[in-house]
Amino acid sequence: MPDLICNEACDGKMNIIDLTHTLEAGSPYWPEKTPGSPFHTSVATTYAEDGYFTRNLAIPEHFGTHLDAPLHFVANRESADRISVEKFFAPAVVIDVSSAVEQDSDYRVTAQDIERWIDRHGAIPSGALVLFRTGWAARWPSQEKYMNADADGVLHFPGLSLEAASFLLDHAQPVGIGIDTASVDYGPSRDCPVHNLTLPAGIYHLENVANLDRLPATGFSIVALPLKLGGGSGAPARVVALIPSESETGQ
């Protein structure tokens, strides 16, 4: 595993940022799959009757801040429980396209966006988690604003272009891709080209990531731990950033 939790540059001083939305009934969900929120709890035990409190939980694999495993789009590939745990501890970078998204809710990150980031900050480390900040997380937890469906039910939110995903595979070899929207493919997509390109390459996704506006452009690490869900096409994840106190702040 790379030396990514701390090194001589950070002197043990670390800021920890939670990048995870709270899982609850009010969290946005894919509207065409269910008539209402797919998040359900029921009380299993109570203080009064049992002396302690517990709940039963029903939740989709792809809900809230979550992982897409390669199995999500590719039969017989890694499920959530079979991805090597080392891949969930990674150096990370943030590529900020929020200004472009302000002008176009269907914006797709371009290869030129990534190249501009590299020109400013240097090469993306091999094996990094590449995070894309679109600013869309500000719409959470409103189902209407976050999923942004039009009158025909077509969703509208930003994502990656196939060109950008191809550029990452060719030039960065990331361990994963993360974004602060419901999908790495933009809302109107029906054939999910970014999923179909990157998941077969063994790259996992983190979707619905929170608080990317609190991260520097580079010089920090991510811990992204999904539920070890047997056979899971994905799983809710707790994602945190570990930021040395001297990290670069401009994006």
Image (cartoon, grey):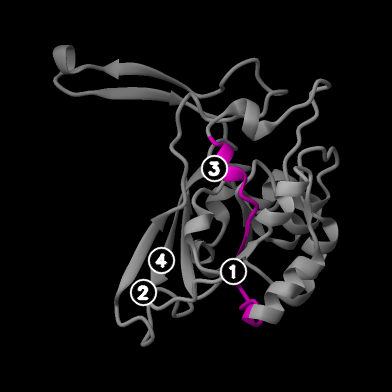
Q: Amino acid at mark 4?
A: Leu
Range shown magenta:
121-140
Q: Residue at x 76, y 36 (%)?
A: 156
- Between the C-alphas of marks 2 and 1, the distance is 16 Å
Q: Are marks 1 and 3 in contact (CB under 8 Å)?
A: no
Question: For the view shown, which residue lies furthest in the bottom direction?
Answer: 8
> Mark 1 or mark 4: which comes first in sequence?
4
Q: Amino acid at mark 1?
A: Gln
Question: Nearest the camera: 95 or 227?
Answer: 95
| Rendering coords of residue 113 (x, y %) | 75, 66
Instruction: Between label 1 and label 4, give the one nearer the viewer.
Output: 1
> What secondary structure is marked by label 2?
loop
Which residue matches tag 3?
235
Which residue matches tag 1?
251
Q: Are marks 1 and 4 in contact (CB under 8 Å)?
A: no
Which residue matches tag 4?
242
> Mark 3 or mark 2: which comes first in sequence?
3
Q: Amino acid at mark 2?
A: Ser
Disc ID at residue 195? none
Instruction: Between label 3 and label 2, give the one nearer the viewer.
Output: 2
Residue 106, relative to residue 219: is it above or below? above
